[in-house]
Image (cartoon, rainbow, N blue to C red):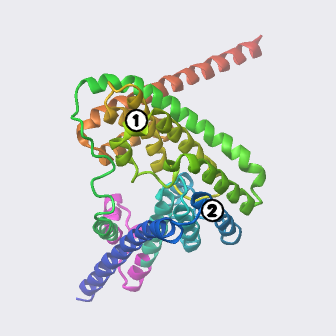
Amino acid sequence: MKKILSVIILLLTAISLGTMVGAVTASFLHLVEWGQNWLWSSLTSSLPWQILLITVIGGILVGLCQKYLGDFPKGITEAVTTLQKTGRLEYHSLPKGMITAYVSLIAGASLGPEAALVDLLGGLGTWVGDLIRSLRARLQLPLPQQFKNQVEKTLQHWPNLLALAAGALALIKLLNGMYSGGFLSPHEPFQWVDLAWSIPLAALGAATGALFLFMQNWTRRLAAPFEHKPILRAASGGVLLGIAALGLPMILFSGQHLLQPAYEQYLQIGFVTLFLTALVRLLMTNILLATGWKGGQFLPMMFGAAALGLSVSALFPVIPATTAALAVMGALVAVVLPKPWIALVLMALMFPFQYVGVSVVSVGLVVIGKQIKERRQKKENRDGTLSRCLITEQ
């Protein structure tokens, strides 16, 4: 009877903690939305030079956060790597990181909330795991590592899995309506000729992905001398963002809310504006990350790719806008991500499934290209090794 009561207590605790994590995460996203609307639409809407004023002040505040709160949150790649290696993401600096990320996001950064969400979910998930482990010990329930059988050990993680499920359900429920309609609701029906159009569009996306990676390395090197001057560094990013956004306001914010309007009005927006928006957004995403602003590159990168695809469709109306946007997007994301097939999964989840063939073609071409490049490098390495061996023997 005592054991049953202990299990019930553990079950209810896991559900409560998981629900709380989902609620906190959803609250952060809602708070970001509210902060952006309040700052841009209510507080400063009548001010002259609003964009430049907010981004410069935002850059100074980000720099102050960097100086006094530390370099938090870490980037997505670093956070995921840490989770893979240790199974943990430390949560002691979580409030500091959320403050810096919040300031960055409401100040109009060309960044998404993904980095903050990974840090938030990873940190809170680690915290919940620690609490569950401590509670199991107090309730004298067996811990997972006390089992030698791997299957039995996995099954004994049921409280963590239950907390994860409760958190996911709470997050989905509390975010209901925030992203209503998805990221893109196309008006055009899928046609088989779209697969043929996907090939040259994927080449354009892959080339732009390579350009994005070049921008990433270049901006990091450019900002490196200012590493120990966080206020100057972040303020410089804010100045550049403000100047660029005066002419191209669509580079502000993460971009997911702009995707549908840009798709519906791409002909009115025109080739030049869409093309410049795409390139400048991709550049500004890297500049802001290099200058200490906090956020994710995934959503702005996707919008930049979509804008580039839509610019092609505006220049050549015979190319369907949906195909252009998704084909360029799929290839660009596949080039930038370490595992290109992740791009296909994300595209299938985020966009209408009828266009999954376009994503398969664009991502598949990138995968083939990466495999050819890897084989060529291996061959060059083997040939180089053989040449050195022959020289040594001679």
Q: Position of residue 121 (x, y in %)?
A: 44, 65
Q: CA–CA distance between discs 2 and 1?
A: 30 Å
- Which type of secondary structure does the marked residue at label 1 adopt? helix
Q: Nearer the viewer, residue 241 or 51?
A: 51
Q: Amino acid at mark 2?
A: Leu
For residue 309, above or below residue 61: above
Quadrant containing the N terminus is: bottom left
Label 2: how many Cα within 10 Å (few below 14, some 14–19, many 20+)? some
Asked whether, in this view, residue 204 is left or right of residue 285, the answer is left
Q: Amino acid at mark 1?
A: Leu
Asked where in the image residue 212 lies, by quadrant, the reply is: top right
Q: Give the residues in magenta.
A: 132-161
- Residue holding disc 1: 310
Identity of the residue drawn at 36% across and 42% down = 265
- Residue holding disc 2: 53
Q: Point out the residue furthest to the top here.
A: 394
Asked whether, in this view, residue 374 is left or right of residue 353, the answer is right
Residue 353 - label: none
Does residue 236 show up? Answer: yes
Q: In the rendered structure, are the residues bearing label 2 and label 1 in contact, judged by CB atoms less than 8 Å apart?
A: no
Asked where in the image residue 222 lies, by quadrant, the reply is: top right
